[in-house]
Amino acid sequence: MKVLNYIDGRWMPSISEQFVPIINPANGESIGEVTVSNVQDVEQAVLAAKRAQKTWAFVPAPKRAEVLYKVGMLLQERKEQIARLLTMEMGKVIEEARGEVQEGIDMAFYMAGEGRRLFGDTTPSELPNKFAMSVRAPIGVVGLITPWNFPIAIATWKSFPAIVAGNAVVWKPALETPMMAQQLAQIFEQAGLPNGVFNVVHGRGSIVGEAVVKHPNVKVISFTGSNEVGKRIAETCGRQLKKVSLEMGGKNAIIVMDDADISLAVEAIIWSAFGTSGQRCTACSRIIVHERVKQQLEERLLAAMNTLTVGNGLEEGVKVGPVINQEALQKIHHYVQIGKNEGATLLAGGYIMQGDQYKGGFYYAPTLFTNVTPTMTIAREEIFGPVASIICVRSLEEAIEINNSVDYGLSSAIFTRDIHRAFTAMRDFDTGIVYVNAGTTGAEIHLPFGGTKGTGNGHRDSGVAALDVFTEWKSIYVDYSGKLQRAQIDV
Ligand SMILES: NC(=O)c1ccc[n+]([C@@H]2O[C@H](COP(=O)([O-])OP(=O)(O)OC[C@H]3O[C@@H](n4cnc5c(N)ncnc54)[C@H](O)[C@@H]3O)[C@@H](O)[C@H]2O)c1
Ligand SMILES: O=C[C@H](O)CS(=O)(=O)O
């Protein structure tokens, strides 16, 4: 399969004529190739988007929403086919891939509904015979830059609100997962979205991504990815006073108190830490446990880890798939060595999986450390792999302090049966997402998604909050008094 750019409603290779292979992380085999674009391709896409947006902005929002509704229906029809491709391209197990496509379907119907809302405010004016209201206005061409770990869901979180609000999109997907971008573009095409409203340019972040960010006609950047890249993008946007929304890394924790339902906590930790092979921004990589239940939790976690089958995510019964590539494998293994060197106790895993069934693929054994202290590197940095660390505490206050002590602030969870402890944690966790008696993953699309501190810059994906990224507030005053009334003057 050859994956091409989608610009102005046409499928085209980059003018560079270069292609790179798309690799299935389960076995290292090439499953296709993708065009690698350059700055001129971005130029063409932005030009098309700018032209198309002028007309799209005048299409009534409920009509714009009808296209999203069709997109939702088409995603639903093709859910299984897209999910299987997603597993082949990115590696996550098929049941998770189905869940990811479902997020896109949910987002389509949710944002289609927004086409009939897009609420602003009406307020009383302080002057007689004067009407005051605020409306959301589209901004223009928006640039989307996305990672490989949720290659279709994150694109829907960003493109659907952008489009329903009357903007046009230039999307640079991750080079590892271009087939998902192709699927989404095909669906927009089939749903009847006018040419140029949605454009995809494949290529390297340092070339295509930077060109999108720098382009003066791209008025908003919505980025999800690593902190390193996010900060760089923010600097560039800052120089241009360009609006930028950043969703970045996490170092998420599950707190297990001494009154917790341990079976429930174990199930949640297994799913949050090792689901998607730990490659979720919301993955649980710290388990902060009360000393009274530490030993019990360790034993039950180890027993549960023994039942995890690692392998090709398309195979029946497999619970943990490969990680994305060789580089990720090495990075994860490097962190495990650091953990050992800094004095953490390795309870399980800690190695790259080898053997016939893993041949060619990138498999890391689910790994558990204990006796980890909050200052150790593995307790502070994002590993983005199936590695979790147990930190022991004596009180809720200590647990909350450790939870909040990292540079990130995406998701945190507490297991307790005590309502006072639960509400204290809800109040004091310094993260954008909080769970009580559930793991750190599993966000739903109708609530804001994002985090505090190093995780973001105050914006949110998902929910109505996403519209704030892609619209500008316009405040409108209509004076029907027939005379010039002046506010801030004694009347
Ligand atoms: N908070 C969230 O919502 C969320 C969700 C998923 C993933 N993530 C984070 O994403 C990271 C993993 O994804 P990744 O490895 O693809 O991240 P990454 O930052 O390497 O890449 C993300 C995207 O940015 C592009 N890019 C790279 N350099 C660029 C540059 N100089 N200018 C513009 N674009 C550039 C890449 O090509 C890719 O499309 C993790 O840190 C994870 O926590 C965050
Ligand atoms: O990043 C996308 C995920 O769906 C969010 S979560 O891990 O399920 O919370």
Image (cartoon, rainbow, N blue to C red):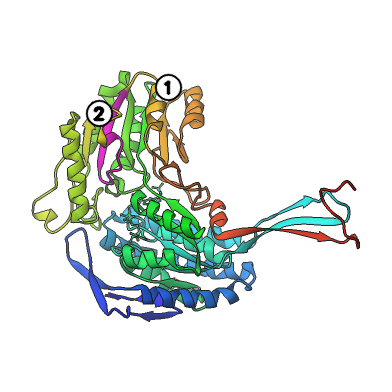
- Name the residue that disc number 1 marks: 397
Viewer-closest of 137 and 148: 137
Label 1 sits on what residue type?
Glu
Residue that appears at 57% across and 63% down = 112
Residue 238 sits inside the magenta stretch = no
Residue that appears at 39% across and 49% down = 248
In the picture, measured across the screen, residue 463 lies left or right of residue 454, that is right
Q: Where residue 77 appears, x then y in whole percent?
A: 43, 67
Q: Quadrant of the N terminus?
A: bottom left
Residue that appears at 43% across and 65% down = 214
Viewer-closest of 56 and 323: 56
Residue 146 figure quarter = bottom left
Q: Where residue 487 appears, x then y in whole percent?
A: 82, 51
Does 245 sit above or below residue 343?
Answer: below
Residue 389 sits inside the magenta stretch = yes
Residue range in magenta is 378-392
Checking the image for residue 62, the label placed there is: none
Checking the image for residue 372, the label placed there is: 2
Label 2 sits on what residue type?
Val
Dot 1: within a 10 Å radius of its alpha carbon, few (fewer than 14), some, or many (20 or more) residues? some
First in sequence, mark 2 or 1: give its number.
Answer: 2
Q: Where residue 172 appears, x then y in whole percent?
A: 38, 66
Q: Where residue 249 appears, x then y in whole percent?
A: 36, 46
Viewer-closest of 8 and 154: 8
Q: Is mark 2 within 8 Å of ligand 1?
A: no
